[in-house]
Image: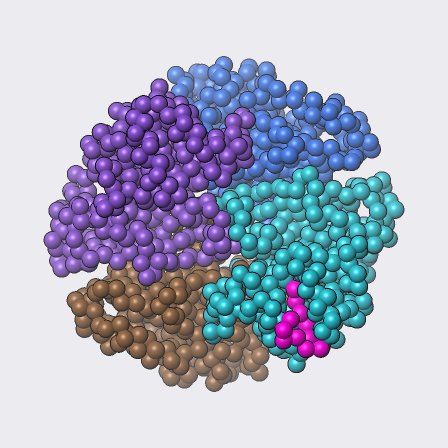
Chain colours: A cyan, B purple, C brown, D blue
Amino acid sequence: MNRVHVIGAAGYAGAETVRLLRRHPHFSLETIESNSGAGEPLADTFAFWRDDDRRFDEPGTGLATLQPGDAVILAGRSGEARETAPKVLAAGARAIDLSDDFRLAEHAGAAVYGFTERYRAAIAHAQLVANPGCYPTSTLLALTPLAPFAGEIVQIVIDAKSGITGAGRNPATASLFAEVDENVRPYGLQGHRHEREIGQELAAAGIAAPFLFTPHVVPLRRGMLTDAYAIFASAPPADAIHAAFRRAYGGSPFVRVLPEERAPSMAAVAYTNDAELNVSVKGNVVRVLSAIDNLGKGAAGQAIQNLNVMYGLPEETALDDLAIAR
Amino acid sequence: MNRVHVIGAAGYAGAETVRLLRRHPHFSLETIESNSGAGEPLADTFAFWRDDDRRFDEPGTGLATLQPGDAVILAGRSGEARETAPKVLAAGARAIDLSDDFRLAEHAGAAVYGFTERYRAAIAHAQLVANPGCYPTSTLLALTPLAPFAGEIVQIVIDAKSGITGAGRNPATASLFAEVDENVRPYGLQGHRHEREIGQELAAAGIAAPFLFTPHVVPLRRGMLTDAYAIFASAPPADAIHAAFRRAYGGSPFVRVLPEERAPSMAAVAYTNDAELNVSVKGNVVRVLSAIDNLGKGAAGQAIQNLNVMYGLPEETALDDLAIAR
Amino acid sequence: MNRVHVIGAAGYAGAETVRLLRRHPHFSLETIESNSGAGEPLADTFAFWRDDDRRFDEPGTGLATLQPGDAVILAGRSGEARETAPKVLAAGARAIDLSDDFRLAEHAGAAVYGFTERYRAAIAHAQLVANPGCYPTSTLLALTPLAPFAGEIVQIVIDAKSGITGAGRNPATASLFAEVDENVRPYGLQGHRHEREIGQELAAAGIAAPFLFTPHVVPLRRGMLTDAYAIFASAPPADAIHAAFRRAYGGSPFVRVLPEERAPSMAAVAYTNDAELNVSVKGNVVRVLSAIDNLGKGAAGQAIQNLNVMYGLPEETALDDLAIAR
Amino acid sequence: MNRVHVIGAAGYAGAETVRLLRRHPHFSLETIESNSGAGEPLADTFAFWRDDDRRFDEPGTGLATLQPGDAVILAGRSGEARETAPKVLAAGARAIDLSDDFRLAEHAGAAVYGFTERYRAAIAHAQLVANPGCYPTSTLLALTPLAPFAGEIVQIVIDAKSGITGAGRNPATASLFAEVDENVRPYGLQGHRHEREIGQELAAAGIAAPFLFTPHVVPLRRGMLTDAYAIFASAPPADAIHAAFRRAYGGSPFVRVLPEERAPSMAAVAYTNDAELNVSVKGNVVRVLSAIDNLGKGAAGQAIQNLNVMYGLPEETALDDLAIAR
């Protein structure tokens, strides 16, 4: 039994992390820490913790009670982990950061980028993991298997649709029910902060073609669907493309490459760490549809997946929730 | 052509007021004032004002440009109208306040309570109208026609369901999409600020029975359905009840008393100033279902209705929008 | 390891039953049968079964392969179980019927009414269980603890709000997204088929006061909130009421009686078999708010709870899913 | 005052047509005809017609009462208009068909394709107008202004998001609330029936580049957002692109080309005949975001716009509804 601390636990990604850890057979939840919720009953914030009187710990509790070998999930706002993570490492504990503080190479230091399907080996030995963003995760799942054909790609178009929990639990007018409901809102039309993360990791995979990324908020809570279009001068044969995806995800328990006639569905991955891909060649375009739960494989689920890898546990541990029927 | 100023225009009730006034044939929109939006393009806030470059006026513009005979709609937060309204009146203008600043008799001063169906005559001559809350409006529409039978009522139960725009456009965690969606949330279980307003007006109508009021937030933007149950020692005959409702609303263009087999529907009144009532006698209970749009008859619509009455215009002026099919 | 068959598995309650059974440690899913889906891949209907090629069995498969000691969940339409259940029993198997075929005493025969919290002992030995409806379940959870005070109740008012999955998966115009969205729809205003079931079980508990039941569809998938108001000539002391609820649910792992200041929430019980109650005395009214998942404790969850009781397993087996954070 | 008949009035597009015509100052609604609703009160189907007892006319009423010069809106299912339209024309009346019966050149006969912004002159004299589909309308609004640069386009990618009313009011499992809610569903992955219509009209505009069209259902009632990406070998200068859009829509009252930093919004066009476009050049991609209401400019709104053109009325007549604030 290992000890784990969640810092920034009242946000949506933090809450989902706590939910997954509450049933994790190999970790005990030592600290559940929140700036905004400190001292309040968990039951007032967590729908899944209504059965006892436990309260949010005060800020600082995790660091104060840290022991060597502990795990810390940093789920606070951008900038906070740059202060906290070094202290965690100094105490001999290991950390996974859900913010973008360590994702870009120029800030990463010794952090390993936590795209599990690609960096498993390095993650296993990492002291600090920079957990990927939801848009990068769904995009990289869709595009990195195309690396063998990268030289022929002339342009990439990424059209992504995200549930509103991706915007976090901070009160903001744009996230109000009355603003989100009955609307689809494209945003970041003049540049989105996730573009550099996507670009870095596509390049790391050897894909250097220019890409255009357009994110949209859709009126639902959890889910992300990314339609990735790779435009070729002359598209590779469909067989070769399908084979590349089979190779890429053969050993990955969470990635389902669907038969071409079956559409991926947000509903089929919601509340899980699963991803669904649909791959087809349409003239000179390779189209890949990629569905994840933005709080699952796009945040907390992948964090637990990385935690399992770091501690030598089977990757699926505590991640076997079934999707909800309806 | 009269002049009208809207102060606090960026909130949901303020916005709906501006929308209705934009097409009002007898009023010109002189001031569209907002603390939070000052200087910003209306197009960024108002879905219905994307076609020109007009911007929100600075706070104070309305008062500074006021002329005798002008109308002012006060749609700001609680407490603001107590400061502003006296200045409006001093300038010879007339005001309608959408907050609860002047609704309770102890604070009302010369204000007239703006439940149009009951106080038309007084509203016509009022300098200051206290526009009712949405919960009181839907409740009073349901219950005040029972006044002739008030002595026999032993208990009233009011179970109200409201869309989230009733909570306003201020960013609050409880109003976020991810909190409201897929949930019904009862609140105010230990007392709700609208109870005193309801009690005052039931008493004014001669209904002194104790009442219990339970509000709920439902996952939609606009609409309010109030199920009002009057428990009698021995219920009056159904004919007498139905006759009382016909008498009460015979001259009221916005209130539809439905045949007993037809259910009221939020969808049938959404985006209008209409109300729908379904009245039946079930054993010793008279049940009245009352549907309004919380921003229509429950706020901005009733404000324009009152404005029309104050300025001697037909009550329906600018309030003839049709409900949306679907 | 026992064998279980689900007949009528493609509907919403059937699907949720299959989801719960897929991970049940003591049952193997022998038959997954559907009239409408026969021969189709489960993956096309079940979001939680996308990982293999299993298909719906043909109608009749369950009966044809039945063995003594097997369990059968009947989740088909009204009327079907009256034909199927006798054959199940004749084969030495035991059945739980989710329809209303055996709920009313006049049709029940040897069936036991499956309100687990009240009839545990009889359910343990039943060959056939009539699983309660969702409205009766939430209502009985709210009201049966008041039995000791029943003589003083003069009227009961039940105002229930249900997610649309309660209407089933049969295509019906009234269940279309565009009809349900942005609306609250009261229905059954002139009588609802669940009233007799509620009346029968209130009477069985000794509560004979007249009741008025008004159901509403709210725009969400899963959840039911019932506001039950018991009007007394003179209400009992709050202490006595609270004590009665503690007594009623002391040994019931799925029922949480909340502190008076905490509101029940559909979100806190969604996707679980839990129920939340808030009880308070307001003048002469005892108000009980009762939240369940209409497909959980209101259907499939309670069916599995009953299955566990019938087979001598801990009541919580396979029912320990956590609610979803958001 | 002209006479108008609506056939197939109970569907979503038919209903919206009736709503718009109810207030049209130059047309009287002679027939409101429905197969499924015949004889039923309009009030049971139309949220906007709760105030009188008018009922749906029987099938055949429109044809039986037709007079020369009348207008007929055909809003029935695919295939019906091929039977009805010739009879309408034979009676000396003029017709607008909302189905796809006459859209493709091979079936069009004398029908004029009703994309108003492009074919105004021909529509003015048409006896039969084939009203465009919603996907083609939003796509053509986005792409046809690029015709002057068509020779340089190497590939077009069209990623479209539609509200569920586009699927019609026929009960279908895939359109149920519980299926659509909390999901985004790509469909037609192996070909969609609107592709030929899009291809025909792009070709008619001189745009021959290959295109890939991917439609998605999003969980809302009304709205369509199409992200159209034109990939160039070398993109034209942004100034030239913007100038082309200004030229294309200079005289079109319903099309707003937004400043580049303002995102189009489904909410800003919902319940109107408006369209919003955002145009930008991103490397070698010209990206055009196009928002309409699928039942507005995508169906009933454009039908009324065409009706106005056919009868020599100002194009905006009866189409001046304001979008809803929230």
Query: What's the residue at 24%, 31% (across, down)?
Result: B126
- Locate residue B284: give its quadrant: bottom left
* Image vertical order of residue A88 relative to residue A299, above or below: below
Residue B175 place in picture, x, y as percent: 47, 51
Q: Is residue C137 left or right of residue B40?
A: left
Q: Nearer the viewer, residue C124 or D87?
A: C124
Magenta span has B17? Answer: no
Query: What's the residue at 45%, 16% (across, down)?
Result: D69
* Image vertical order of residue A260 relative to residue B121, above or below: below
Residue B132 place in picture, x, y as percent: 29, 42
Magenta span has A68? Answer: yes
Q: Which residues are magenta?
A: A63-74
Q: Is residue C303 visible?
A: no
Query: What's the residue at 48%, 42% (across, down)?
Result: D169
Quarter of the image with the N terminus of chain B in it? top left
Q: Is residue A182 left or right of residue B67?
A: right
Residue B211 place in picture, x, y as percent: 23, 56
Residue D214 place in picture, x, y as percent: 67, 42
